[in-house]
Image (spheres, rainbow, N blue to C red):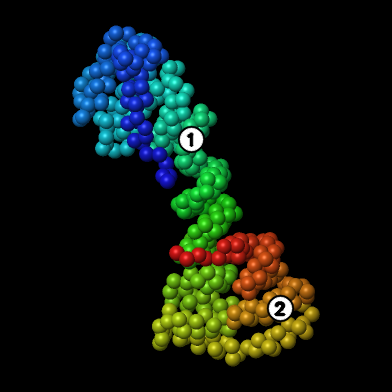
Amino acid sequence: MKMVSKIALAATLVVGMNGAALVAPAFAKKEKAAEAATPSLSKEARAAAVDAQTALGATPKDLVKAAAALDALDAAAKSDYEKYLASGLRLSLVNAQTAGQPETQRVAALTPPLDAIIANPATPKTELGIRYEERAGFAYATKDYKRAVEYYTKARDLGFTNEDLQLNIARSKVESGDVAGGANDLEAAVKAEKAAGKKAPEAWYKYAFTRLTKAGLTEQADAWTAAWLTEYGTAPNWRGAIYTFGFQGPAAVKYSKNRIDLFRLLWATKSQAGQREYIDYADAALTIGLPNEAKTVIDEGFASGVIPKGNVTGTELLTRAKTGIAGSSSLAIKEKNAMGAPKGDLAQQAGDAYFGTRNYAKAIEMYRLCETKGAPDADRNNLHLGMALALSGDRAAAKTTLAKVSAEPNKAIARLWTVFVDAPPTAA
């Protein structure tokens, strides 16, 4: 399925639409009924039209003869029908003459006869929708996006339809500056595909969330990212989504204090691509005082062979993690202190510590305890509780909890984790 119509369009069908269907019957003596139904032509216009059509139908086409015949037809044409016929044959001639030329040159040459067909009152209404769709393709090709929206919409209103029309309206709106409106139309195109039992192309989703992100429409972009991962949630796509979401450009600054939750999602989606991500994950854990998690990550990296044995950075991080563990309370003591504390801060810390060792049952217990004592940061507690519930397998409770996260940037991270809950990664 194509993203936008090519400018070759239906110009090659012009002879069939304006020529064979309209000229030949007038000269086919055996087709009396067809002759009677065909608008009358002057003797001069008829002769020129037949000459032009014959030249265009030859193998190979005789473009010189066709051009001369069309000049004669232009001179002879008086009625709207004769002018309509001349414009259609001219469009077919120009289409043949410009074959192989750059797109901009073809558009410039094809536009005048096409506009003449659209403007002519003799043009059949059944043809107008097709012509407006073609004209919209010309406008899009020359980056006249507002006019493309106008013409595609006109084609639709005239009853024209094809599998790309709604998509082309959407893309034209986006390119004209109406990103939100275009995204809404694109959503309608996706729904139409699903209603027809088809799967919308992956490129549609990428186009939508890329343009929405560029326009600063973050929540809409996140929704399209979620839809993309739901339909095309391979591990490489998850990795790309997470990096685009929080590790690149301005987002890297926005989520600098939440990097650990994105590394955890990389791990959960099995989309870590190499040793760098294990090392960066461990470093992020150490930076916020989670040596148990740092050790877990480096141990996993060494055990899987992703981090080569003897790797200097990995070994250094493991040493730092062990030192941090030795210098802090055990998990059992953290839990005991959390149980006896009047407030929930120690319980939240104990939950994070257990989370890092992949003991989600204990992490959930501590986060729940934090709730009862009053969380110092309710959003962060709900985010981590939702993540722990998701990784424990309790997806329903995870969704409910993640939905409670109300403030950015935790809210955006919760949305991404909710996608993971709804649509875990698929095979490539």
Depth check: give the residue in front, 258 or 50: 50
Residue 335 picture location, percent across and down = 71, 84
Depth check: give the residue in front, 279 or 86: 86
Q: Secondary structure at mark 2?
A: helix
Residue 260 picture location, percent across and down = 56, 72
Residue 11 picture location, percent across and down = 34, 30
- Residue 415 figure quarter: bottom right
Is 266 on the left-hand or right-hand side of 51?
right
- Residue 79 figure quarter: top left
Q: Is residue 234 above or below residue 103?
A: below
Residue appearing at x 51%, y 62% in the figure: 233
Residue 151 picture location, percent across and down = 47, 31
- Residue linked to disc 2: 365
Depth check: give the residue in front, 68 or 337: 68
| For marks 1 and 2 on the same chain, the one whose residue lies earlier in the sequence | 1
Mark 1 crowd level (few <14, some 14–19, many ≥20, 10 Å Cα) = some
Amino acid on which the number 2 mark rests in the picture = Glu
Q: Is residue 390 above or below residue 201?
A: below
Q: Which mark is residue 161?
A: 1
Residue most extreme to the front: 30
Mark 2 crowd level (few <14, some 14–19, many ≥20, 10 Å Cα) = some
Residue appearing at x 46%, y 41% in the figure: 164
Q: Secondary structure at mark 1?
A: loop
Amino acid on which the number 1 mark rests in the picture = Thr
